[in-house]
Image (tube, helix red, strand yellow):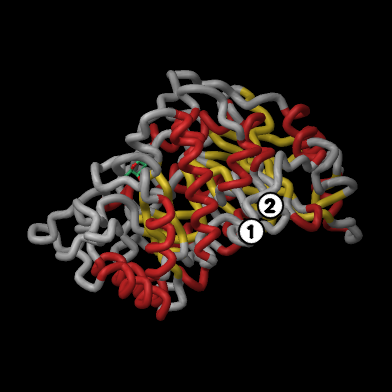
Amino acid sequence: MKLRSGGRRLGCVFARRCLALVLCGILGAEALDNGLARTPTMGWLHWERFMCNVDCQEEPDSCISEQLFMQMADVMVSDGWKEAGYEYVCIDDCWMAPQRDSSGRLQADPQRFPGGIERLASYVHSKGLKLGIYADVGNQTCAGFPGSFGYYDIDAQTFADWGVDLLKFDGCHCDSIKHLVKGYKYMSLALNRTGRSIVYSCEWPLYTWPFHKPNYTKIRQYCNHWRNFADVYDSWESVKSILDWTSSNQEKIINAAGPGGWNDPDMLVIGNFGLSWDQQVTQMALWAIMAAPLLMSNDLRHISLQAKTLLQDKDVIAINQDPLGKQGYCLRKEGNIEVWQRPLSNLAWAVAVRNLKEIGGPLSYTIAIASLGQGVACNPGCFVTQLLPEKMKLGFYGWTSNIRTRVNPTGTVLLRLEQRIYTTPETIIHIL
Ligand code: GLA
């Protein structure tokens, strides 16, 4: 389902309001009580890159088949993805046979998944990884395969029997919003009743927005993460629209995020065709600030070293996975610059400076530390490291000092601020 941003390019909501929300530490509600997703889920999901390619004759290496997921699992282990924290290998739409079996159970397409999902799950588990699968709350999946309506208990049990570890539950082909809401809740309880630990990834708010503002308090009680906005595409236009939607709606959504439940701005498309280097940096930096699930959709068998290094950057991943679990927000928009920030554990903060311009060269932007707000790490002083686009220690800064940045068009500079008391003479440089 596609939601439009309505052409609106709203800037960030002014700092104080957001900051107050964050500092109060309000979590709208209890998280889904399944003990999962205490930090945002990390893994790989086939949809954006491989879509609904079912033609294994013509395209054996990129059709939706067990081979694709086995190869991806192999590479995740051999090329450092697992070590970097990417754990879930996730199947999206188009894995199913067109009909349920005679007992009403979903079945995988027998040609493309000759060993069935159970064997695939064992394979993925043997690599120390987890397997995700996809189904739909309505009568059909978005691509027209059997939906789970009327079969929630059977499907939850089938997934548990197969050894599935995550369910992405889509919201296409639902008769009514009432049915959608009931279905999302029912499936959450059905998964819990199986006794297996299954991360529950919802699209409930995305399908609710056209009717009314979603009840995020409820959604958090039932889902481990939830999609709010349109599908990501391999384009700057798409990534930009997701960021614009998020900053425009942040007051409605950021309080809902926290250990156990996260806003999901959709897949990382880094390593594909549509984003420049600076735009890939922006996606990685902002997904870290937003405490977003990091589900890559790319071809890990053929990926540039540059994209791999970005996706595996441990300092950026540490921001994304920060145990405090507070989602960052857009602090201000000033001309062509947006400043985002996220509070981290141990009184640290992440700050991202985005250059919105799509013309010209790098923009210089100076952040007055005091303008980041009282709660920020730099009172009386902090140590600042630039993490992206390159890692650089910038040194000690005092409360009244400024950080100078230079940001490429459509790019982002990501900083980490750690609270420190300055003691040595060289630190004075940035303090005066
Ligand atoms: C919807 C979802 C996508 C993807 C497709 C599959 O559009 O939002 O993420 O799962 O369905 O058909």
- Find out whether the residues at labels 2 and 1 contact each other: C-beta distance under 8 Å: yes
**Nearer the viewer's eye, disc 2 or disc 1?**
1
**Image spot of residue 221 (x, y percent):** 63, 46
How much space separates mark 2 and mark 1, taking CA atoms? 8 Å
Point out the residue furthest to the bottom here: 126
Q: Is residue 191 left or right of residue 301?
A: right
Which badge, 2 or 1, is on the more N-terminal residue?
1
Tell me which amino acid carries mark 2: Gly
The residue at label 1 has a CB less than 8 Å from ligand 1: no
Query: Can you say which quadrant of the picture contains the N terminus?
Result: top left
Residue 193 pos. (x, y %)? 53, 60
Mark sitting on residue 8: none
Name the residue rendered at 50%, 61% in the picture: 198
* Residue assigned mark 1: 38
> Given the image, on which type of amino acid does mark 1 rest?
Arg
What residue sits 58% from the left and 56% below the top?
Answer: 316
- Residues packed near mark 1 inside 10 Å, few (<14), some (14 to 19) or many (20 plus): some
Say which residue appears at 89% left-offset and 61% top-offset: 424
Q: SS of the residue at dot 1?
A: loop
Quarter of image, ligand 1: top left
- The C terminus lies in quadrant: top right
Q: How many marks?
A: 2
Q: Residues within 10 Å of mark 2 (few under 14, many from 20)?
A: many
Q: Which mark is residue 325?
A: 2
Q: Position of residue 275 (x, y in %)?
A: 37, 43
Ligand 1 closer than 8 Å to the CB at disc 2? no
Q: Helix or strand or loop: what does disc 2 sit on?
A: loop
Side of 426 relative to 322 (left or right): right
Asked whether 374 or 246 is in front, the reply is 246
Residue extending furthest left? 57
Residue at the front extreme, as displayed: 103
Q: Position of residue 111 (x, y in %)?
A: 15, 65
